[in-house]
Amino acid sequence: MPKILRVELTSDQEREVRERLRARNLAPGARLRLECIRLLGRGLTVPEVADLLECNDVTVRGAVHRFAAGGFYALADAPRPGRPASITREDREALAALLDESARQGRTWTAAALCDWLAAERGVRVSAAWLTGLLHRDGFRWKRTRDTLRHKADPVLQQAARARLEDLRLEAHAGVRDLYFLDESGFAPTMSTGYTWSRAGQRAVVPREDKKGRRVNVLGALCVGSHADLVWARTCGKIDAVMLLEFVCTSLARLPGGAAALDRPPAGFTRVRPCTVVLDNASAHVARAFKGRREELAAIGVELFYLPPRSPELNDIERVWRSAKYEDYPERVHTTAETVGTAVDQALNRQRTRIKGSAANFTKAA
């Protein structure tokens, strides 16, 4: 019968165990052995610790013998045989700090450039292929960058806008207000490249078409809350203030007669619920032909809420555009404006189905 092993830890040793387990760079083997000592110190038996940590009894007994012979320092992994690694943990931490800081500053790095930096700054020479594998193990990935305007936005204005939007969302989900997020987006005959499945060693190609006269511009509005919906209008021409006003009056306010009836709406016309339209400061949005009609729009129950400059992340419809272009627009090339328009309608109809379905599920859950 195996000898019953016990571990008794002092209060200082218990504190040291906790501190060592909190170390981020602790090797998996050393962490397992520390856990064995911690649990045995709490009165568990060797079989109980082995069952809890899903390891063998021999592993637990080995940790006890190491600890009895050399204390906490004996629980560390033994040195690996062979030539020491040319890049140390300190080098890897410096490399990680460089990449994190560069990601915030807009600086990009290739594996070859990182190898040059290591050689110049740390005196370490490694191959790009080996460094790529090391970066993967440290949680880094080679991926496409994304541009942003957040560094130019006013944080005070953004905070105020977020607070106002939160109140509007609560009213929209309560069913006492219609909340629309409005914006425009363009669809070209050849859309920007994305991702697809293809055989290893082969690259899927997208033929490029001339976009002159075949670009489709879409004016859309996303309604959030208990009456979630997506409405849009498309054109091959420019979306100006006149088209925008007609879209708001017809599709959002549902005013009989559209913008032509805005000065003298039909007697007794009123919206079932007040409506707020959230939009950015694009030229068509702030043009006198549209923004100058705010009082008339307010009279029929439509409020315009302008977002702070350079704040696209506050406009919910931006996510709809991205999803429609990269997920629901599989045919990346079209030869006529008509086929582009058809593809746009198909993509946005898929988005609309998901939006209305999500709202129905939310209502049932509530």
Image (spheres, rainbow, N blue to C red):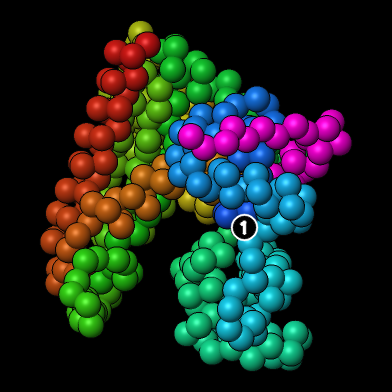
Which of 356/50 is in front?
Answer: 50
Q: Position of residue 288 (x, y in %)?
A: 54, 45
Let me know if residue 254 is in the magenta part.
no
Left-right relation of 3 to 119: left
Which residue is depicted at the point 65% across and 71% down? 79
Which residue is depicted at the point 74% across and 39% down? 18
Which residue is depicted at the point 24% across and 45% down? 348
Q: Quadrant of residue 273?
A: top left
Left-right relation of 355 to 248: left
Let me know if residue 17 is in the magenta part.
yes
Q: Position of residue 341 (x, y in %)?
A: 19, 56
Look at the picture and state if 336 lies above or below 86: above
The residue identified by callout 1 is 27
Which of 230/338 is in front?
Answer: 230
Look at the picture and state if 38 lies above or below 208: above
Q: Quadrant of residue 249?
A: top left
Left-right relation of 291 to 67: left
Q: Which residues are magenta?
A: 1-25
Residue 192 in view (yes/no): yes
Disc 1 crowd, CA 10 A, few/some/many (<14, 14-19, 20+):
few
Which of 266/19 is in front?
Answer: 19
Left-right relation of 240 to 106: left
